Amino acid sequence: MTSTVLLIEDAPDIRLAVRSVLGRAGMSVVEAEDGRSGLRALFSTQPSLVILDIGLPDLDGWEVLERIRDVTEVPVLILSARGLETDKVRGLRAGADDYITKPYGNQELLARVEALMRRADQRSETVDESFADGFLAIDHQSGSVWVHDELIELTPIELRLLAALTRRPGVVSTPQQLLDTAWGDPTGSGVDRVKYAVLRVRRKLAEAGGEEAAAALETVRGFGYRYMRPAD
Ligand code: CA
């Protein structure tokens, strides 16, 4: 089955380059040159991944990302402009799964896209036992997560992050370990991806179970993160 990538980018030269790199890797690329047509294409093509430029005419990338996250947990890779550290942070906070900064190499782009796709595919193939401790329940077959009895929606990356932490309750994982297990990125660079994914999962836990639910993902300053079931 061919994977479809939706590319929302107004610069024709970048669209051409992305289409050719991903096309050679056997993916089909649907292109949109502005946010509104990107959102229409999201509904009509149901892509496996979205690559989203931030600097877009009409709706900017932030608004597009927000609307994408209102309706789907599809993996989103942000294309951010050179040197804009705040864009990365804002993108990860708002629910993007990864980012890549222009200018980037074609191989780097392909590697990021393939890693996100692989993570999404493996959600249904994971051999993990399902997890339940009376507070949190994870069904790895369906990718469903409940806080008490409330279903929460996680992106594939967020689910893998939570699975990595709940696999060893009370044990601290470093951001580098989590990048490796959840993102499949053994380089250990770009650990802010972990930080913001943790914040997103906490926010979703809090929406379902209040502030003490969010505290289940604990930051151990200077070391990393761990999962601790909240006391009853
Ligand atoms: Ca642009």
Image (cartoon, rainbow, N blue to C red):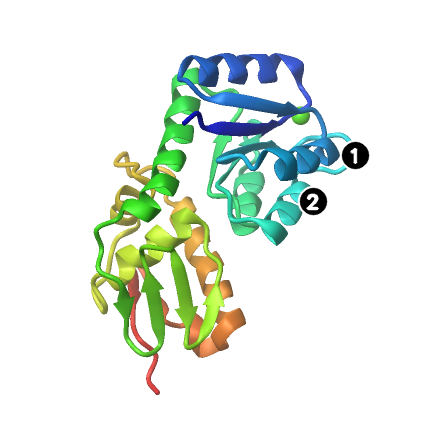
Q: Which residue lies furthest to the front in this view?
A: 1
Indicate whether 165 appears above or below 181.
below
Q: Which kind of residue does numbered mark 1 sit on?
A: Asp
Indicate whether 66 appears above or below 19.
below
Looking at the rendering, which quadrant does residue 63 occupy?
Answer: top right
Give the Cα separation between the discs numbered 2 and 1. Answer: 10 Å
Identify the residue position indicated by label 2 in the image.
Answer: 63
Identify the residue position indicated by label 1 in the image.
Answer: 58
Give the percent coordinates (x, y) of residue 231: 33, 84
Precedes in sequence: disc 2 or disc 1 = 1
* Of 205 and 39, the residue lying toward us: 39
Looking at the rendering, which quadrant does residue 179 occupy?
Answer: top left
Give the percent coordinates (x, y) of residue 206: 50, 71
Give the percent coordinates (x, y) of residue 87: 58, 40
Q: How crowded is mark 2: few (under 14 residues within 10 Å), some or many (20 or more)?
A: some
Ligand 1's image quarter is: top right
Looking at the rendered image, the quarter that the N terminus falls into is top left
Query: 45 left or right of 35?
Result: left
